[in-house]
Image (cartoon, rainbow, N blue to C red):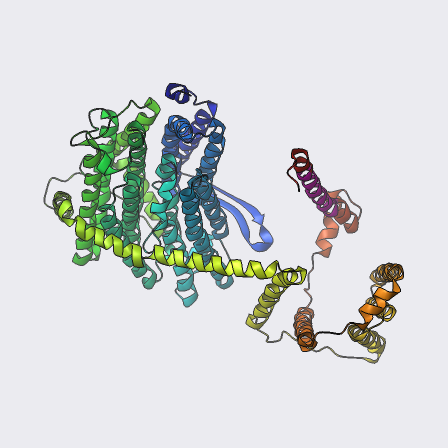
Amino acid sequence: MRRTDVVASGGRLPAATAALATAMLVAAAAAWAAGGGAVDLPWAPSLDLRLHFRLDGLATVYVLLATGVGVAVFAFSSRYLPLHLQHQRRPQSDAVRFYGLLVLFMVAMVGLATAQDLVLLFVFWDLTAIASYFLIAYDRHEAESRWAALMALLVTGVSAVLLLIGALLLHAKYGTFSLPDLFERTRPSGTATLAAALIALAALAKSAQVPLHFWLPRAMAAPTPVSAYLHSAAMVAAGVLLIGRAYPLLEQSRLVLDGLIGVGVASMMVGGLLALTQDDLKRLLAYSTVSQYGYVVFLYGLGGRIAASAAAFYVLAHGISKSALFLTAGAVTEATGGRKRLSQLGGLARPLPVVAAGSAVAAATVAALPLTVGFFADELFFKAALERGTFFAAIAVCAAALTFAYLGRFWVGVFLGSRSAASGRLPRAMVLPVACLGGLAVVGGVVPSPVAQLAGEAGEASVLAPAAVSVAYHLDLRAENVMALAAWAGGAAVLLGSGRLQGILTSFARVGVRVGPERLYDSIVAALNRVSDAVHDLEVRDLRTRVSAVLVPAGALVVAGLLATPTAAAYVMGDVYVRDIGLLLALLLVIACALGVTAARQHLTLALALATVGYGLAAVYAFFGAPDVALVAVLVESVFALLLLGVFSLLPPAVLRREARLSTRRGRRWRDPLVAVISGCVAFLLAWGALSRPTPDEGVAAQQTELAPAAHANDVVTAILADFRALDTLVEVTVVAVAFAGVASLLRRGRLR
């Protein structure tokens, strides 16, 4: 297929997805202009779960970012993806999965931004992790993509468990998952601090903050649109979104906020220094993303209304500009025939003037130059740092200088200097998104009031207090302007001297590779693989070990739960009356027969003892006033006893005699009884504790009886049999039908051996 044919084969799917993103963008903007809105519906009332969504200022920031950048990414992908699939000799039909996953991620991000319930947040949080896993591994035939996707899933997915644990801790203490209710009820305490720290850790892992930053550069194995969307404006933004959403919980602990400051400073510096060492375009931008989101985490750690509003302002400015830079990297790589390293590029401003101009504005936005929205983002950043003191202001200037240096290195290395690579023409759909995103950055720099208003409302949602933002150009030597001038001068000095610093920076990067967190991650994964292999080899040895592999861990978890559960008033000894003699005799009969089963050698004795255990339990049911259950137990026990005797009658007598003479191996004579005694004691304690719980005064029986006519049934039993059991049977039949269809397909293709 020729290049022109591939470019022309966009199809309807890209247009449909771009239209969907546009519709969501317009709807979100209109709803925000109208004052926002909320939806609050019951989800699982018995578990205190609700489908509670609210489009407040904070949610609007991330919804507009997810949908707005989504429009640009979908438009870019309409021409990029056909070429990408052609280069890899893959069918164009693979585009369906790509767009489906991008739409799924966009919807999940919108749900995450608007959720007002911690469990609901967790659901959408994991949904973004799953969608990102498949998007990063879109080129699944490449080992690097698969490994990068697994790394991203493990770091961001496993850390999501911390979010769930934090939510459960808060619910256990305050009785709700609702964030507005938690904000009202929560007071500084050890539980609140622990829960806040767990939530913050989950957020930091998602935002690729040091030391959990290493997954983001690896994720650059994904196609460029994925990097531009997930790793600049959406997925990594989800982490700081969680910090902003749960900020009223986090700010109650100075320890948690100080931790955010430390992580933010480390991320700004480590990400910035490593960006200066990178030759690969996307990895350079990835490390810059680590550094830039360090700004946001640092701001939340500083605390206060200005910092919260500045964080939202910075997220908007960064998302618009960084996505444009990622798209620039993809466009340049496509135009130069696959070159993606700074050392292979240069002088592309003339053959790619629109891309050069759009990316120049985007780089200037992140570097906070005037006439871009990034200038005001840094102004607020400097102002928040100044409020905490000179030391924090100095850190802010150093971080801004690093940003200027590595983004200047990116743009100068690609577009200035002598041409080192031939450049072909790019489709318009790969050029216009870069230009449009750059244009938005300029509009925000000239008319910053809408962005400032939105950032103020986002800050208000985080600190639960008015947080108005006022930005404007001031031609004077106020502290923020002096800090900006110092940052530009320092950044220019670092950029000009970067060649002399490469040796030191490279040594710094090598140390990180040898003893950094990625090395620890690799070691842990390798160790887990070895343990998994050993357990697998043990498990598949025979049926006994397969069953043990399930029952032993399950038993260990039950014992752990039993030991961790408070036992005060958990075990109650009931009174025994004369009328209970029949019940006690029936129980003694069951115990005696159960012990007799373990000692019986003859098969007839074994069958009769088992049947007597069943009949004894039937008698127990009868004494407890359940004659219907007792009759069913007698019927079932009789059928099974007859079947067992029938099977014994069909077996050769010699086989039965040989089996009866078998002796237990010496190693199992004590092991098996010991395991049986321990298991029985644990089961006895669990049953005793459950039966010792007082019966609720109000059960659900009356409510179910009242609701039976609504299910078109005369009684509860009919409703259960007709609705729940019928539905269960339908599911079982469906599973069997799917299994038969799969077997038939394999038989037809001759693949079943």
Is residue 145 shown to the viewer in this render?
Answer: yes
Is residue 339 one of those drawn in magenta?
no
Q: Nearer the viewer, residue 588 or 552?
A: 552
Q: Answer left or right for 709 relative to 175.
A: right
Magenta stretch in the rendered image? 723-743
**Image quadrant assignment for residue 279:** top left
Location of the N terminus (image quadrant) = top left
**Image quadrant assignment for residue 422:** top left
Q: Nearer the viewer, residue 97 or 549?
A: 549
* Residue 742 at x, y percent in the picture: 66, 39
* Residue 607 at x, y percent in the picture: 85, 67
Vertical relation: 327 (above or below) 658: above
Is residue 471 shown to the viewer in this render?
Answer: no
* Residue 66 at x, y percent in the picture: 39, 38
Magenta segment's dominant SS is: helix
Residue drawn at x 68%, y 33% as measured from the top left: 748
